[in-house]
Image (spheres, rainbow, N blue to C red):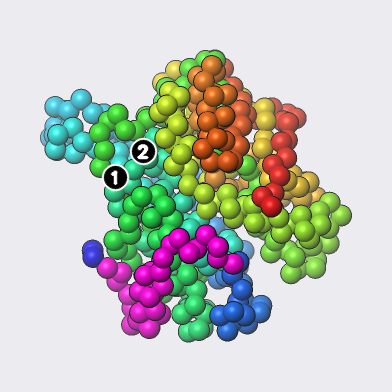
Amino acid sequence: MGDYQVTGVQQDALGAVQLELGGNPNTLALRRPFDPLAHDLEASFRLTRFADLKGRGCKVPQEVLNKLVEGLQQDYNSATEHEHAHFMHMAIPRIGIGLDCSVTPLRHGGLCLVQTTDFFYPLVDDPYMMGKIACANVLSDLYAMGVTECDNMLMLLGVSTKMTEKERDVVIPLIMRGFKDSALEAGTTVTGGQTVVNPWCTIGGVATTVCQPNEYIVPDNAVVGDVLVLTKPLGTQVAVNAHQWLDQPERWNRIKLVVSEEDVRKAYHRAMDSMARLNRIASRLMHKYNAHGATDITGFGLLGHAQTLASHQKNEVSFVIHNLPVIAKMAAVAKACGNMFQLLQGHSAETSGGLLICLPREQAAAYCKDIEKQEGYQAWIIGIVEKGNRTARIIDKPRVIEVPAKE
């Protein structure tokens, strides 16, 4: 598909998009935070309002998803000999569905097709940053498997029926511009996609790469003695919720004793900055330091994704997590909320989170030092790989590492 398919109601908005997307991305380094008034919108405009699901869950529970994935895997495993035959002459294994990407051997010259898709609802109020976060989130699945080059992206966009024409004409071009600028930063392009009208605003995409087997790292080789490294802090969900509560006195009163408005604003901007940052350098360094596998931390939280990664290991190992790097003050906020987020238990959702990487013990410190040198951001050794039955756990009283807000 060569261009965005749009419905008639959106034609005017997406005409303006072509002007937006023609801008010089270098000028965006100095861009100011989104101000609704600067776009002739109401001062009370909040993009996150278009993610209101009226109490319904935003994601499929992990146990339900696991059953669905197992069903798909069984469908593949029970395929006929004829259906498998064209893979048999290749040295490339067909990799299962339960990992971060689909990896499919191609008929041509030992190459593989690596694909992933993702989409979600607005969780920050800056449309441009929302676009960047959505793109980084899609690409993160490639990076989790050590794939650092993306050949092509598609954008998937749902425009909320609750938006006024003015809101739509301002917000949608900014989201698309953010998505495209993130793709450019990743060295790839957005060549198409699909746009629909929907009760809620949704933003996501598809990332595709054709690569050789040595370009990806199958995440199943952890060995006893490895250490676990995390490349972004936790607490993004807590930070974005706390920021929304600044406008909700009954919610704010629950946390104001442990955090100031300034703390919350810093945490929110730290979370936005973290979610919009690509995991590309983290992925590239996985090859340099001989990583044995990785996954990215997203909707099921640190422990949910650690358990999935552990369950795929070839060796009889388990993961034990001792340290939790958390955006400053967000652990206190989570506790003040009566533990609704389950942050320190590892169940708090993260969006576009860091990579959780199994590294040889003797190379982990060098990995962390290298990523800080190249990116200016920390990574942390958070746990160990020990002999076990392919599970993951967080110790009873993990050490919380406060990660200062980016000034």
Residue depicted at x 27% and y 68%: 3
Q: Nearer the viewer, residue 389 or 385?
A: 385
Q: Is residue 369 visible?
A: yes
Rendered image: mark on residue 209? 1
Q: Nearer the viewer, residue 380 or 159?
A: 380
Main SS of the magenta segment? helix
Q: Badge 1 local density, few (<14 within 10 Å), some, or many (20+)?
A: some
What span is colored magenta in the figure?
A: 3-32
Q: Which residue is mark 2?
A: 147
Q: Is residue 93 above or below residue 57?
A: above
Which percent across, then down, holds residue 8? 33, 82
Q: Mark 1: which secondary structure?
A: strand
Which percent across, then down, holds residue 23? 40, 69
Image side of residue 143 versus residue 367, left or right: left
Image quarter of the N terminus: bottom left
Residue depicted at x 61% and y 28%: 381
The amino acid on which the numbered mark 1 sits, given as a three-letter code, is: Thr
100 magenta-colored: no
Q: Badge 2 local density, few (<14 within 10 Å), some, or many (20+)?
A: many
Q: Is residue 159 above or below residue 316?
A: below
Does the CB distance between marks 2 and 1 fall below 8 Å? yes
Q: Nearer the viewer, residue 365 or 80?
A: 365
Earlier in the chain: of badge 2 and badge 1, it is 2
Which percent across, then down, holds residue 369? 57, 29
Residue 73, quarter of picture: top left
